[in-house]
Amino acid sequence: MDSLAADSTHGRDDPIYEHVDPAVKGFAVGIDAWNAEKINWPRLACGVCAVGYVVFGTVARFTDRGSRVEEHNPVESGTYTINGRCENGGCEQDFHAAGSYQSVPNDYYDEFGQHQRDYSTRYLPACVYPPPRLMALPASTPRGVKESVEYAASALFSTPHLAIVALRSAIEALLDAKGVPESKNLHQRIEKLPECSEESKQDEMKTNRDLLLSAKEAGNAGAHQTGTTVLDDALEMAEIIGVVLHSLYADPRPTIEERAQRLKEKFKPKKRSK
């Protein structure tokens, strides 16, 4: 595979995310490039070994028949495929991605004040297989929660609404693990979390309850959105769930109150709904 040189920090410097891999968002929103031979693909975390990162090679493009490729109006669209490999020598899992691409106009004025227009190409993924790692999970995270998060990662690029459904399932699986009984709806079930916990942990569980309610609201908001908005809501939901999981299962466990405060500063509160 002809690999491309890539900065190991590319796509990983988003201050919003501490658990969600920010490269996932960089990949999902689309990659703009001027030269198909020099695309700085975000380095996704390997979902197989959970140690290495995926280095992608050269993209293969297939132009739509209806595209107009003219000298002064190079509007082009089509589909693409690209192969990658985990850089971890103990893994070297092959990855495959596919999606669509289209020409994107870039208007500007030159030094003489004349309007100019250039075109870059935007690559929008529809699938990545095997799915990359959406976020790091503590080793003792319940199996049902892990499986739901992994499914969310597989759906994120093509149908982020399904990723939100999977993350709601992750919350349900977490409540199962904590012995919270079924309720009329997810909101009411989350509300029961503190009372189903040991007395010495109820204050901590109240904070986790509030965080899970915020995660649910992010998912509710995303369910009625499109484009990058639903993607942002899905990733916000995943990040909040990650904070809760680390507060419950990480070793050593972080202080949940401090993490909750940082989340409030990062994400705007959403109106609660049942």
Image: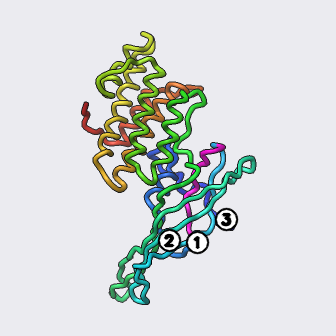
Residue 158 quadrant? bottom left
Dot 2 corresponds to which residue? 33
How far across and down, in percent of the image, does residue 231 sit? 39, 50
Categorize mark 3 by other alpha carbons within 10 Å: few (<14), some (14-19), many (20+).
Answer: few
Magenta segment boundaries in residue numbering: 38-49
Amino acid beneath label 2: Ala
**Do residues under tags 1 and 3 come within 8 Å of each other at their CB atoms?**
no
> Where does label 3 land, which residue?
3
At 61% from the left and 48% from the top, the residue drawn is 46
* Distance between the alpha carbons at the discs numbered 1 and 2: 8 Å
Majority SS type along the magenta span: loop
The quarter of the displayed image where residue 40 is located: bottom right
Q: Amino acid at mark 1?
A: Lys
- Is disc 3 in contact with disc 2, using a CB cutoff of under 8 Å? no
- Upstream in the sequence, badge 1 or badge 2? 2
Q: Amino acid at mark 3?
A: Ser
